[in-house]
Every structure is written in C-alpha cells, then in structure tokens.
Image: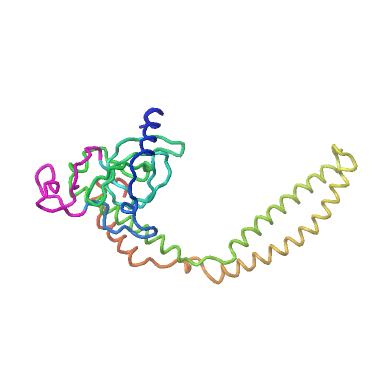
Amino acid sequence: MSRSSVLFAALAVCAATASAFSFSDLLPKRGAAPASSSGAAPAADPSGESAYAPDGAYDPRAALNPDPGLPWGVVLTNVPCFDGRLRVVGTIPGGTAVEQVEARTAPTGPFVLCKVLWKGEWQDREMWFRASDVAIFGGPCYAEADPATRNAVLDYCAAWGRYEAARAANAARTAVNPHAEEYERAREAHEAMRAEVADVLARVRYSDTHDLPGGPRERAELLARANRLRVEQRDEAAAFAAVRDRWQAWEDAHPAAARVPAPTPEMRAAAAEMQRLRPAASALLQGL
C-alpha cells in the first residue's frame, strides 16, 4: 500500500541525510554464506530482561533492545537492500528478521521499508527491500510472535540463503563452451546476412514487375548488390560453418548433464535442513 509522493520524497531525503552506518558489520562477505545459522538474534544472557518473551518465558532469540512494535517478517533468501533512492547498498542474508515500517510503489515494483534485527539488536537504520524478497506476516511484532513457529521460519530461510550461496558458488565451476562467445557473434552475423539477402531478393522480384522510384538506375544498383551478396553470403556461410562446427564439437564432447557439478555437501546439508523445517515453517510461509 503506497502513500503520497510527498511522503516518499520526505522518506528519501531522510534516508539520504541519515547519519553514517557501517554496512561492513551488517552484510555478509561477498559470495559467502551467512555466518550464522539464521538472521535471528544470538542467545541473550538469561539474566537479561530483554531475553524474555512478553509471557515471561526465556527467549534466547529476543532482541537486546526494545522491539519496534511493528508487523514482523523475514528476508526469504540472500537479497539486495536499498537506500531511500532505491540504490543497492548491500546484501542481507536469508533468515534475517525484519519489521515493516512503510511501503511504496516504484516504477520497478513494490518496496517495503524495514527495521532489521542484526546481531541481537534492532538497527537504527531502516532499509528498503523489494516486497517479493521479504515475507511480512501482518500479525504481531517479532517479540510477540510464537517462538517455535518464528524460529522455524527464520531457520528455514537461513538454510535457503546458505543453499543459494553454495549453489551459486557451485554453478561458477560449471564448464562453459570456450567457443560460445565466438559462436554467438557469428550466429548473429549469419542471421543478419540472411535477412539482408532476403530483403534484396524480394526487392529484385518486385522490380521485375514494377517500376522503382529511382527508375532503371535503381534497379541496376539493386541487381549489382544482389550479385555481390551472392559472393559475400558464400564466404560468410563458410566462416560461420567453421565456427559452428568448433562450437558443436565441444558440445558433443561435453554433454550438458556432465558439465553441471554435483551438489556440494553444503548444498545437501542446507536442503536437508529446509526439508526438516518445512512443515513448521509452512504455518507462516504458505506454498513451501
């Protein structure tokens, strides 16, 4: 649900002029899986009052500072976060707890402004996320959510984030046809040549029964161009065939199924964790 443009302009100004914040402590290392098993807070000191839920039960994932008191949610997997001008400022790992502050609709789609729970504390800086990258449950705040279901959701999404990080690293090791770029350029040039030949020949056929705007001179130029294209197309076709054959020979020697690396132990462990948590997490995350 978006607000007026005046409100969002004010939000953007506030975000741009906010005090400096170190993202080096907030964001995971590039290309690495999140350091913790979930984005939830680490265990608090049992003697600390903030480690207790509203009903007085000890909650090892309670925040160490006051809950913002807004509808809580979770970052689904490792996703970008944005500043008030919707510029990417980093990546937040899956399983990070958030609470929604505001919503807006941008030309690229809906966004939500969130408080972020990181390293046991609700951060002062608020960050924008694509609405599709977070699940906001619209019920109680984080501190008042059912701990068992809440933790299952956090841990499921943290495992999802670890799986995606491991999968991306594994995919980078996939064998790539070394002739792919050359073949793509040659294929585009080949298609362009075929299109030009078809166009010129169609105009020649038209000139056989119709007068062209340029008269006999234009027809003579058109016929000359058609004759040159026959030679050019022959040479181009031979060059393209050589590139295509090199590309195809590599493809034949490296079947696609064999080029994809087998799942890594990290991927298998994360997938197993997701499978274990799916029944409990599906109480909030529908369609798992």
Residue 65 painted magenta: yes
Q: Is residue 275 above or below residue 257?
A: above
**Relative image position of residue 285 (x, y in whole percent):** 29, 46
**Relative image position of residue 205 (x, y in whole percent):** 82, 45
Task: Assign the magenta stretch its main secondary structure.
Answer: loop
Residue span colored magenta: 42-71
In the image, farthest residue toward the bottom = 253
Q: Residue at x 18, y 47 (%)?
A: 64
In the image, farthest residue toward the right = 216
The residue nearer to you, when weighing 7 against 19, is: 19
The way the protein has been coloured in the rendering is rainbow
Q: Residue at x 39, y 35 (%)?
A: 12
**Relative image position of residue 18 (x, y in whole percent):** 34, 39
Q: Is residue 165 above or below residue 200?
A: below
Q: Say which quarter of the image contains residue 114.
A: top left
Compared across the picture, whether 180 is left or right of 207 comes to: left
Q: Residue at x 9, y 45 (%)?
A: 56
In the picture, the quarter occupied by the N terminus is top left
Q: Is residue 225 above or below residue 3?
A: below
Compared across the picture, whether 9 is left or right of 208 comes to: left
**Relative image position of residue 40 (x, y in whole percent):** 24, 51
* Number of on-image labels: 0
Compared across the picture, whether 48 is left or right of 149 comes to: left
Residue 26 painted magenta: no
Compared across the picture, whether 142 is left or right of 217 comes to: left
